[in-house]
Amino acid sequence: MTTEIKRPVDDGGTSGTLGSRALGMGLLVVAAVLSASCATSSPTFEGDIVWEDDDRHPIEAPEPRKATKYWEMLDHTLFRPINQALELAHPEPAANVNALGEVPNSSWYTNRLSVRDLSPERVARGPCPEREWNLEGPLRVTRAEHTGHGLDFWAVAESTGQRYRLQPDRRTQPGRATTADIVGSRIYWAAGYETPCIRIAFVDDSEMTVDGDTIPLEDVHGHADAMPREDVHRQLEKVTRRRDGALRIAVSRPLPGRPLGPFEYAGTRRDDPNDVVPHQERRDVRGAHVFAAWINHFDVRQFNTASQFITEEGETRGYVQHFWTDFDDALGAVWFSDSMSRRFSHSYYVDLADVVVDFVTFGLVPRPWHKGRVGKPHDAFGYFRADNFWPRQWKPGFPNPAYQRMDRHDAAWAARIVSRFSEEHLEAIVERARLRDAADARYLVETLRKRRNRIVREYAEQVAPLAFPRTRGETLCVEDLLVGGGYLGSDRTSYRV
């Protein structure tokens, strides 16, 4: 067997270390392929190239779990870091990877762009069915939910009884929140995660009615209150509108299966026998840090996830499927405080380390948010820019136990997938957002492209950027991300095997 391995020289032009790393990667790939062809034992993550992690064995339905928003923040910000410091635990590599360092298919992850080409049209459709559904108006609003930074509504189509979740856009950043849901759900889906099918709809006021004098209003803790009809209409008056006055809303249908509440970013679910790998040790969960950073999905918490119990028709036993939901904070959300919004992605909501440094230095240490400015003239996307984006320094709203475990191999795995998103993919995704201003759409595509490039360059250079091994007869071919993506020219490459 002959081997083709490409390896570019880094920006400094030194090739010795890079050549040895390429050799190691090449031997790893060769060994993996040979082990797959010669193995006779049952598949294991450590040996054979496993592409299916069978965690969908039929089980009895677990009990739905409720989570408390502020406890999660307190636990991840204070208690868990203290516990980890006392344990002096050594970081472990991801547990759910095969011999190629890839993530097998499971109830958490499905290989899509990671292993095959998808057309821009297919990526833009994302999790939605091939036959598109339309709103069957008029809609009767039945309840409302606090999301922590806005209100969502649930409505029923009068003609069919179909339920919909309505996520209105706010006039303060017209088009951003609904566009973030479109972009986030498509990028995460193409990367391999399960997301809801979200579409942009324009609804006339005449098509929106309220179910009675009041509707239930659920807060972030799950407590219900009553919301008067007048307040519903008052909230709808704050929604972004099309030039003809129609309301701009992101619409989705309920997820399949029975709701079991959100999943956690650490530990396992005790009442799910299939859930055996601690979530913080999963490469797909760790590597999600890279995708969140790409679109600046900083409000990463368990409330923006969902676990659904999936059963076959007529069966009572099934399995738990995991979903990533609610991306409306992404793409530059500006919340009630501009000074706080400037810090998003640079510092936690409550960042004890930053507080101590600012206190000791009287706030004289330069911070990235001191020079924060909106991306004018495209201020709908707030502080979502590319020139102030450093992937390895990106932070979510509060510490995430899985993201904190991400190592360079987890990051390189995710960066390989990010590199697969072409500019045509990004254009097709943004087109689905149906932005009114074509200049805003171009700005968003360009910013996503530049942030993609920064991710690939930063993480691909931590390990040999060799990916997507495949055979051509007796030849093993490996793609070099930096050369194939145009980050380095062939005249700046050196190969040694």
Image (tube, helix red, strand yellow):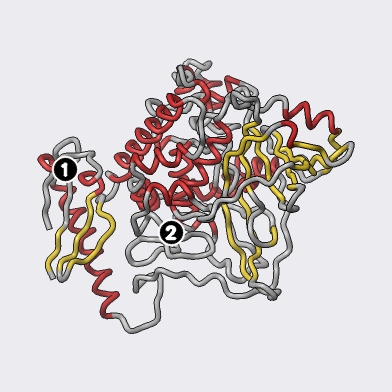
Q: Is residue 196 left or right of residue 390?
A: right
Which one is in front in this view, the residue at disc 2 or the one at disc 1? 1
Q: Quadrant of residue 389?
A: top left
Q: Position of residue 52 (x, y in %)?
A: 44, 70
Amino acid type, callout 2: Ala
Residue underneath mark 1: 9
- Front position in the image: 237 or 322: 237
Within 10 Å of disc 2 (Cα), the crowding (few <14, some 14-19, many 20+) is many
- Front position in the image: 414 or 96: 414
Q: Position of residue 173 (x, y in %)?
A: 58, 24
Q: Is residue 133 left or right of residue 445?
A: right
Q: Position of residue 339 (x, y in %)?
A: 57, 20
Q: Residue at x 12, y 51 (%)?
A: 495
Within 10 Å of disc 1 (Cα), the crowding (few <14, some 14-19, many 20+) is many
Q: Is residue 365 visible?
A: no
Q: Residue at x 33, y 43 (%)?
A: 422
Compared with residue 19, is residue 152 higher up or lower down, i.e. above or below?
above
Q: In this view, does 223 lie to the left or right of 191?
A: right
The residue tagged with tag 1: helix, strand or loop?
loop
Residue underneath mark 2: 94
Compared with residue 417, is residue 145 higher up or lower down, i.e. above or below?
above
Amino acid type, callout 1: Val
* Lower sequence index among marks 2 and 1: 1
State the separation of the CA atoms marked 2 and 1: 28 Å
Q: Where is residue 288 in the image (x, y as percent from the top left)?
A: 47, 48
The residue tagged with tag 2: helix, strand or loop?
loop
Q: Is residue 188 visible?
A: yes
Identify the mark at residue 49; answer none if there is no mark: none
Q: In which quarter of the image is residue 23?
A: bottom left
Q: Which residue is drawn at 53% across and 37% down?
A: 180
Which residue ends up furthest to the bottom in the rendered image?
40
Compared with residue 243, is residue 317 higher up or lower down, i.e. above or below?
below
